[in-house]
Image (spheres, rainbow, N blue to C red):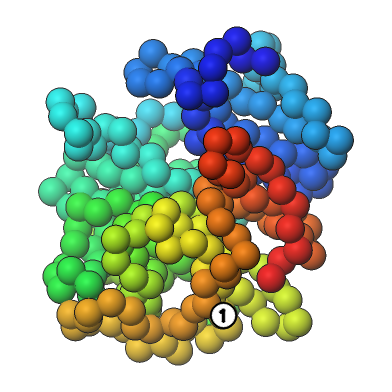
């Protein structure tokens, strides 16, 4: 459909429209800076179509403190935006800035008019045994704790951190609370929250530690991790062995999730019951 070979197609993200249940895919045709961005849509029958953006009304905003591009394998410009979500009239954007504490979360009112500086985020990384200010949030979900909105953010190697949305003010320095260390040598890819049997859960896809299921009730009661640890601590989890190669996931409805699965050569969309 895109006129190229599978190795030149990159699926960057996947979202389910909660009303229509149609699935939207953010796709790159080609690799590197010359790749062409495409939005694709699938319906319940599996038919794929391109979402035409000609003559579509849109709003845009420039980030005033994006990091400069650098040569080499570690280019912070590529991590200006690592994840985003719409929360109560604001778009929350995670990524890096050009500040000394470059890990950033910014809250941008929508419809867009202007974006201020983001809030700089500091966390304690237990398996590294140090405070970190330059590691970006990889994926996050909004979640209510004690009737207040929070960000539950996951980082590489793999701290789970809670951050109050109320503190995401321009230029603010915010210290997140690490409530779990989920294992090193791992990169979180995507996460969702859902309710089953009266209990809230988090479902997280990872690069090397499979799909994790964590109980979310009572997250505000977990003691902050503030000391070095060897591997895992805090919020317990189970690894769901039946799910392999999951790279993206989203909630389809109250009973099912949609997963984008790398099946060793093909990328498959599968509907699965929420575990």
Query: In the figure, residue 161 lies in which quadrant?
Result: bottom left
Residue at the spot 35% in from the left edge and 18% down from the top edge: 33
Question: What residue is shown with label 1?
Answer: 215
Query: In the figure, residue 225 lies in which quadrant?
Result: bottom left
Q: Residues within 10 Å of mark 1 (few under 14, many from 20)?
A: some
Q: Which sits in the foreground, 16 or 170?
A: 16
> In the picture shown, does residue 124 fall above or below 249?
below
Q: Is residue 183 visible?
A: yes
Residue at the spot 53% in from the left edge and 51% down from the top edge: 245
Residue at the spot 31% in from the left edge and 33% down from the top edge: 78
The picture places residue 170, in percent across and down from the top left corner, at 31, 50
Whether residue 102 sits left or right of residue 58 in the image: it is left
> In the picture shown, does residue 61 fall above or below 130?
above
Residue at the spot 75% in from the left edge and 52% down from the top edge: 271
Which residue is at the far front?
264
> In the picture shown, does residue 57 fall above or below 225?
above
Whether residue 261 sits left or right of residue 42 in the image: it is left
Q: Which sits in the foreground, 246 or 50?
A: 246
The picture places residue 56, in percent across and down from the top left corner, at 67, 18
Q: Secondary structure at mark 1?
A: strand
């Amino acid at each position: 459909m895109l006129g190229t070979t599978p190795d030149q197609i990159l699926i960057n993200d996947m979202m389910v429209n909660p009303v229509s249940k149609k699935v939207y895919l953010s796709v790159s045709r080609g690799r590197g800076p010359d790749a062409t961005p495409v939005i694709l849509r699938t319906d319940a029958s599996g038919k794929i179509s391109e979402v035409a953006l000609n003559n579509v009304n849109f709003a845009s905003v420039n980030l005033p403190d994006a990091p400069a591009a650098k040569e080499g394998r570690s280019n912070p410009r590529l991590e200006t935006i690592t994840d985003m979500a719409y929360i109560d009239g604001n778009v929350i954007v995670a990524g890096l800035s050009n500040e000394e504490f470059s890990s950033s979360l910014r809250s941008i009112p929508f419809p867009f008019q202007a974006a201020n500086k983001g809030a700089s985020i500091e966390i304690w990384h237990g398996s590294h045994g140090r405070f970190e200010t330059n590691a970006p949030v990889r994926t996050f979900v909004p979640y209510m704790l004690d009737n207040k909105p929070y960000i539950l953010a996951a980082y590489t190697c793999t701290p789970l951190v809670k951050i109050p949305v109320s503190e995401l003010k321009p230029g603010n320095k915010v210290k997140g609370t690490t409530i779990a260390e989920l294992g090193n040598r791992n990169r979180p890819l995507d996460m969702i929250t859902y309710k089953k049997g009266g209990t809230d859960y988090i479902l997280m896809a990872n690069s090397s530690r499979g799909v994790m299921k964590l109980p979310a009730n009572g997250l505000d009661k977990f003691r902050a991790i503030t000391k070095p640890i060897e591997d895992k601590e805090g919020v317990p989890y189970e690894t769901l062995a039946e799910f392999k190669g999951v790279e993206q996931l989203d909630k389809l409805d109250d009973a099912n999730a949609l997963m984008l699965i790398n099946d060793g050569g093909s990328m498959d969309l599968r509907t699965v019951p929420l575990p």
